[in-house]
Amino acid sequence: MQGRLIYLIGPSGAGKDSLLDAARAPLAERGVRIARRVITRSAEAVGEAAQAVSAEEFARLEAEQAFALAWRANGLAYGIRAEIDAWLAAGEDVLVNGSRGYLPEARQRYPDLLAVLLTVEQDVLRERLLNRGRETPEQIEARLAR
């Protein structure tokens, strides 16, 4: 029996990484794997259990078809390694930290995926983004407007 892809989405700063960290052990007990993302951001700035790579390394991996899913957002490249296909084929459910903008493409590849939208009130999100310190207040307001 084929496993199911669980595709977690929500705005940057909504707490997806915190949710994944809190859910990791209970989900593992139920046989759900959490896929590690590959991101073109420095390891110090990733803020999640992701693998940081250079843009050149990401492009090489993408050309080698190392990713089951890959997208660009906010000036960065994100990938989910192709190993998830073997996990799904073995009947394991797999949870990924996805992208709202990439959801249509992900759904084309995995038509039965379960999309889970994490939401947070805008004032809380603004505060979290400001505290994170990765963007200017103007960039944060533009992000919130989207």
Image: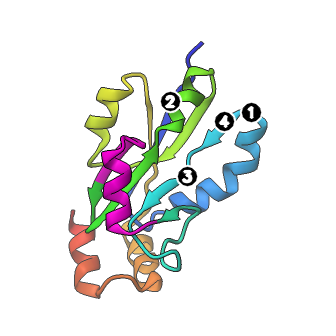
Q: Is residue 21 shown above or below 84?
A: below
How far apart are the alpha carbons under marks 4 and 1? 6 Å
Q: Amino acid at mark 1?
A: Arg
Quadrant of the image occupied by residue 138: bottom left
The quarter of the picture where the C terminus appears is bottom left
Q: Is disc 2 in contact with disc 1, using a CB cutoff of under 8 Å?
A: no
| SS at mark 4 in the image | strand
Which residue in the structure is indicated by mark 1? 30
The quarter of the picture where the N terminus appears is top right
Q: Residues within 10 Å of mark 1 (few under 14, many from 20)?
A: few
Quadrant of the image occupied by residue 106: top left
| SS at mark 1 in the image | loop
Which residue in the structure is indicated by mark 2? 85
Please provide the residue range marked out in magenta: 53-71
Q: Residue at x 53, y 71 (%)?
A: 47
Q: Residue at x 50, y 45 (%)?
A: 96
How far apart are the alpha carbons under marks 3 and 1? 18 Å
Compare marks 4 and 2 and give the one earlier in the sequence.
4
| Whole-percent x, y for residue 12 in the image | 39, 64
Residue in the foreground of this view, choosing between 21 and 3: 3
- Residue 32: which disc? 4
Which residue in the structure is indicated by mark 3? 36
